[in-house]
Image (cartoon, rainbow, N blue to C red):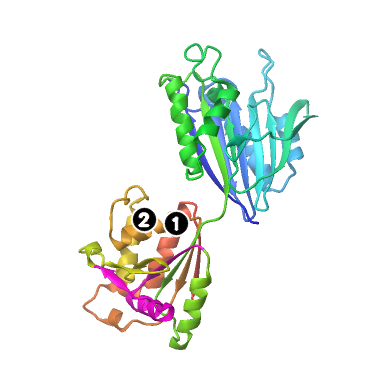
Amino acid sequence: MSVYYEWGTKQLNKRSEELCGDSIVISRHSDSVTLALADGLGSGVKANILATLTTRIAMHLLENDLPLSEVVETLGKTLPVCEVRKLAYSTFAIAQFFSDGRARVVEFDTPPAILLRDRKLFPLPSNERVIAGKTIRESVLELRMGDWIVFVTDGVLNAGIGGVYPLGWGWGQVTKYLEGHAHPELSAQDLADKLAETVAELYAGAPGDDVSIVVIKARHRLVATVLTGPPAKAETDEAVLADFIKRRGLHAVCGGTTAKIASRHLGRPLDVDLETMRPDVPPIARMETIDLVTEGILTLTRTNELLQNDATRETVRFRTDGAAALVRLLLSVDHVQFVVGLAVNPAHQNPNLPGQLGMKLAVVREIAEELKQRGIEVGIESV
């Protein structure tokens, strides 16, 4: 079992503050996701600096493969204690999530992480120990597909204080709220946004404390394979299509000739939908077992332009053309594998056609870069 971790984050600044006094850093590695969340003492610039210092030290040490216990010890020795209030200048939660489902969470003076399984609170097994004079809460657990784990700072628990909830919303109420809203179809970002919206309402739009929310969702990795262009050697058509169809996840075919090869190999008819034609994008086609069939280079070029102009699934949600459909597909997965056929299309050598028609591989590479900037993994292979 390989677990993929999707995350969503949301922060709200304390009223009248330009900077949030909390800091969140998350990074993905080949087989794990690492999280550091810190709440700086007080608010504003000073708290922001302290929280940022905490998360940066933690992430730097973790990325250099230091064990969590040593990271905590280093933080304990590095972060001072306020002489007046006798409080640590920064509280923190550090977590590592591994692709085999293992996870380890270390928390210091921060609200306990909330683990939801089947939309119910699942007790987090934990033990306490003292490291560098600080009492640390440590949890080691095995996550399952569909689990949610939510981290919040005090600002979430204090929501509604003196108003709807005289003593604040509290950990128990936050947990009940999450149990009622963690629907499987929601993304991690959706849940983080929902929780933050409710917190803002409880504060009547003027948070009395900095608010930070991190939502981690354990799920299967979503993959799409995009086949564009026929193989360099026509005799490999059948083998390439057979391999393409066997791949898990979504399947897209970009290119008229490629679509005809797929239709022949699968024994499925191509149904061109002229209603989806646009002045700059040829129509899409329908074929059973293939999720999306579009024209080739013109559609890819327009897709690249949309991504460069910061298109999102929402901004192209109601568009029916092939480029918009391809953008939606590409942005709906965690990994996109492009399979680029290197056969030369005679039509693209026509001097009357735009120059970019001979640049299919270059366009695919540009699309790949745009996707990578959005955190999507991309692979390109030639056939």
Is 206 situated left or right of 102 in this image? left
Is 317 situated left or right of 215 in this image? left
What residue span does the magenta drawing correspond to?
Answer: 249-273
Can residue 334 be seen from the camera position used here?
yes
Residue at which label 2 appears: 307
Task: Classify 302 as above or below 39.
Answer: below
Q: Looking at this view, is 123 or 229 the one in front?
A: 123
Secondary structure at numbered mark 1: helix
Residue 264 within the magenta-colored segment of the rendering: yes
Q: Looking at this view, is 133 or 34 the one in front?
A: 34
Q: Residue at x 59, y 26 (%)?
A: 40
Q: Looking at this view, is 159 or 269 the one in front?
A: 269
Q: Position of residue 74 (x, y in %)?
A: 73, 35
Is 4 situated left or right of 349 in this image? right
Label 2 environment density (alpha carbons within 10 Å; few <14, some 14–19, many ≥20)? many
Secondary structure at numbered mark 2: helix
| Mark-to-mark CA distance, 1 and 2 | 8 Å
> What is the three-letter code of the residue carrying label 2?
Leu
Residue at which label 1 appears: 371
Residue 11 within the magenta-colored segment of the rendering: no
Can residue 46 be seen from the camera position used here?
no
**Quarter of the rendering occupied by the N terminus:** bottom right
Q: Position of residue 219 (x, y in %)?
A: 57, 50
Q: Residue at x 37, y 82 (%)?
A: 344
Q: Position of residue 212 (x, y in %)?
A: 53, 30
How many numbered dots are placed on residues in this image? 2
Q: Position of residue 122 (x, y in %)?
A: 65, 35
